[in-house]
Image (cartoon, helix red, strand yellow):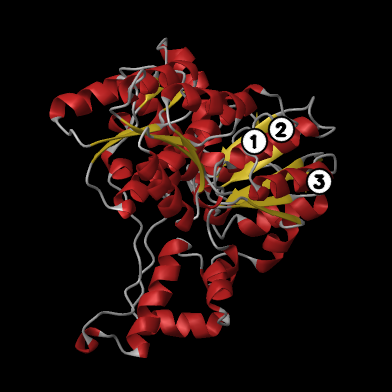
Amino acid sequence: MTASILVVDDDRGMGAMLYAALRKKGYHVLVATSGDEALDNLANLAVDVVVTDLNMPNMNGLDLCARIASNRPDIPVVVITAFGSLETAVAAIRAGAYDFITKPFEVDVLCLALARAVEHRALREEVKRLKQVVGETSQYEELIGDSPAMKRVCELLDRIADTDASVLVTGESGTGKEVVAKAIHRRSRRSKGAFMAVNCSAIPEALLESELFGHAKGAFTDAKTARKGLFSLADGGTLFLDEIGELPMALQPKLLRALQERSIRPVGSDTESKFDVRVIAATNRDLETAIEERRFREDLFYRLEVIHLELPPLRSRGSDVLLLAQHFIVHLAEQSGKKVTGLSPEAAARLVAYSWPGNVRELQNCIERAIVLARFEQLTVDDLPDRIRTYSRSHVLVAADDPSELAPMEEVERRYVLRVMEAVRGNKTLAAQVLQFDRKTLYRKLEKYRYSEAPKG
């Protein structure tokens, strides 16, 4: 939408010049010749930014700025004056001005200030809206977000929650896979049963089998009593197998048989027992690649992936970043006993611009740190970690002014392929889809480029 600018200047010639110049830049422009007329316009018309001269009769620019800051703090004010000095600038800022420009000035300089002011107001309104949204109850209280990506996730949850189908939840580390598993459990007819979770990468192989299936008395050293496994403990409820991609190969056929037969045999026992459990598995690994590399059984993959639910990374969820941030502020400020109510527009802009490689978990840690350091009721840019304050997106260089610096097509392709692999965090299946390569072609190119997959957290 076109921003609406109110120009306030008792010099009709200056007002007419700014009207014509800002209209050429695409703004909707209103002109007032006095402070009183400007206040009447603000009371009756939609205005995004006010641009006011400083020296005017009856009500000068500083007085007008103070009135607007008091009655309409949502509207930023840019003050223009020919009498620029440090004292005047400080007075304007104290009166509530958003920015300060001295004459003579280039129209492009004013437009740059206006663009920042418009963005500032939009972010302020968005933060205000998100405070209201966070306070509203939703169908899935655990899943904060109103982006199209999260709406699709919730729509799929509606369709699968009250079934017994196995679910494979995939997504980058920190996207909330266990949160989704718990949401499915709470919405299902198994909600009164137990929700049991196990991290397949956190338990040694020798103990993981007993953890899952239980063991009989005397099955191994120190097995002085029989012990039930998670399949038995979760009977009538849900079993969440986190980091399923790390399940040892030796245990994969045993898990597959248990899922097929719906029965388990504890370690060291000769008898089997039936179980009634819904299984939800999760991973941040590319299981299709693991299958091709013979690190994961294809038959187990299809047994687990009756329903596949992929969680979007936080960087693709737009303003959900601010919605989640406000949610964390409400809860973490209460826990810490600090009076922090929200974000400054500048801090909100930095959060939106950052790429969030650690996803929701990283955002939560960021907000927790910011609240500890906060000195005001709103979190400011200074409260954010250095990596977020100084972040700038990386780009693939494919051109330069000097023809001798231009890269050959093969080098451009190499840079782009590696940039895509970085963006999808090593997920070869997704990278092949983005690049429109078949998987063998992608593997061949990665081998040629000596691509080394970084460990995933």
**Sequence-earlier tag: 2 or 3:** 2
For mark 3, give the secondary structure: helix
Which kind of residue does numbered mark 1 sit on?
Leu
Residue 417 in the image: state x and y as whole percent.
42, 76
Q: Position of residue 27 (x, y in %)?
A: 50, 50
* Pointer 3 local density, CA inside 10 Å: few below 14, some 14–19, many at least 20: some
Asked whether the beta carbons under mark 2 and mark 1 sit within 8 Å of each other, the answer is: yes
For disc 2, the marked residue is 140
* Residue placed most toward the observer, 386 or 243: 386
For numbered disc 2, what is the local secondary structure? Answer: loop
Q: Quadrant of residue 62?
A: top left
> For the point 70% across and 35% down, which residue is it?
183
Along the viewing direction, whichever of 230 and 28 lies nearer the viewer: 28
Residue under label 3? 160
Q: Please tell me which residue is depicted at 67% across the width and 34% down the height of the picture.
A: 182
> Looking at the image, is mark 1 or mark 3 earlier in the sequence?
1
Q: Is residue 254 above or below residue 132?
A: below
Which numbered circle lies on residue 4? none
- The relative height of residue 174 versus residue 440 in the rendered view (above or below) is above
Q: Position of residue 138 (x, y in %)?
A: 72, 29
How far apart marks 1 and 3 lie (CA) works out to 16 Å
Residue at mark 2 to residue at mark 3: CA–CA distance: 14 Å
Q: Mark 3 is on which residue type?
A: Ile
The quadrant where residue 368 appears: top left
Where, by quadrant of the figure, is residue 118 drawn?
A: top left
**Which residue position holds label 1?**
143
In this rendering, position of residue 133 left or right of residue 415: right
Residue 289 seen: no
